[in-house]
Amino acid sequence: MNIYGLAIIHNGAKFDFPFIESLQSMAPFVKSIVINYGECTDETLPRLQALRSSLMTPLEILHSKWDMSRKDRGLIFSDETNRALKWLRDRSDRDYDDRDAWVIYLQSDEIIHKQDFEVIRRDLQLAEESGCDVVRFRYIHFWQEHNKIAINKKWYPQEIRALRLFSDVLSYGDAQTFYKYKKIYDSDAHIYHYGHVREKSAYREKVDNMIRFYHANQDYQKYARKWKRRDRCTETLDYFGPHPQVIHERIKRLGGVITLPEVERVYIVGKDITFSPETIQRIACKKVIFVSSLKDVPKAFYPWTIVFYPRIRDKIFHRSLLDVVPLQMRSPLARAWSQDFVLMLKLSAKGISLK
């Protein structure tokens, strides 16, 4: 099964998009990458050309002229995505090597982690076998810093980011999703979304630019105030879980934390819970101890104790030990997180990271 990468970019350097890291993250996973490059006024093209010279994976830069005067709710982004998708379909071999090909689409602030490569390959094969023509991935939305994730209803918990190359599927709306598909396969692989963590001045310019793409000039002030109100109401959780390797230097540049100092012990309280051995081994501590009740935990280690499914007694007598981590994002469309992911968030709430 051939897998191709697809992306679009406009003024990625000016607005501090992690577009190079995004392309690097998918490069080991795909046969080649096509990126629709809209004419820019910054260093985006030289950076793409430099990346093309260094990548082992072919990077094809599709030059196009974007209509920057449009104010129609971001439809320019789906139009330009579909332009790149059509180019890829037109040049591919429908009868032989590419008849079962898939496309991975990443926006220029989205990254995939190499730990998910095998999961994605498996899920694309399962999607193919079950007659699905798109695959939907879970999302991690970083908000304002690399150690906070957004979870309230505004944020989409999963979205389509893989599609069969030869299908009727097209990008839709502002390119957040796709339509004209027949059947969805839901994957547990994650898309890491870094669009709201960047240099402050570039972020302000980016938000201003996005508002102008979505709304007519006379409505700008109205919608700018609305976006700011929504931003102030963003509900977040601490995050000290894994980040893709390609983003580590950017995280350091912007003052984020990748791992925290190791702690002595972590106690995990709960019954009928199962975690993968890999997750337990990656906890940044010298020893992990499983117990069935809080009475088995020395009080000196309460700050590093995770109560997975608190009982009524715990909620009454040990409220200060409990965290505020839910079992899924707030959206009614959200699927429950895996127990491993919830554990990672509960550890993060206690200031404990994964290695």
Image (cartoon, rainbow, N blue to C red):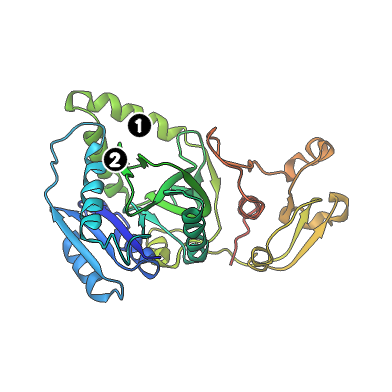
Residue tagged by mark 2?
Answer: 207
Please determine whether, in this image, residue 152 is positioned above or below residue 117: above
- The residue that label 1 is drawn on is 227
**Disc 1 and disc 2 in contact, CB within 8 angstroms:** yes
Q: Is residue 325 left or right of residue 228?
A: right
Q: Nearer the viewer, residue 253 or 128?
A: 128
Q: Nearer the viewer, residue 26 or 132?
A: 132
The residue under the point 43% across, 59% down is 112
Q: Amino acid at mark 2?
A: Val
The residue located at (55%, 39%) in the rendering is 334
On screen, residue 7 versus residue 11, left or right, reads right
Quadrant location of the N terminus? bottom left
For marks 1 and 2, the one nearer the N-term is 2
| Residue 4: percent from left, percent from top | 33, 62
Write down the quadrant of residue 3 in the picture: bottom left
Image disc number at residue 95:
none
- Rendered residue at 44%/54% (across/down): 192
Rendering coords of residue 125 (x, y %): 48, 60
Q: Residues within 10 Å of mark 2 (few under 14, many from 20)?
A: some
Could you say where residue 275 lies in the image, as x and y percent from the top left?
70, 59
Can residue 237 be seen at all in this image of the molecule? yes
In the rendered structure, which amino acid carries the disc numbered 1? Trp
- Judging depth in this view, the residue of 198 and 58 nearest the camera is 58
Disc 2 on helix, strand or loop?
A: helix
Q: On the picture, is 230 further left or further right than 336?
A: left
Residue 42: tell me if it is visible: no
The residue positioned 30% from the left and 57% from the top of the image is 6
Which one is in front, 220 or 6? 6
Q: Give the alpha-carbon distance from disc 1 to disc 2, as whole Å.
A: 9 Å
Residue 95 on image: x %, y %: 29, 62
Quick one: label 1, few (<14), some, or many (20+) residues within 10 Å? few
Could you tell me which quadrant the C terminus lies in? bottom right
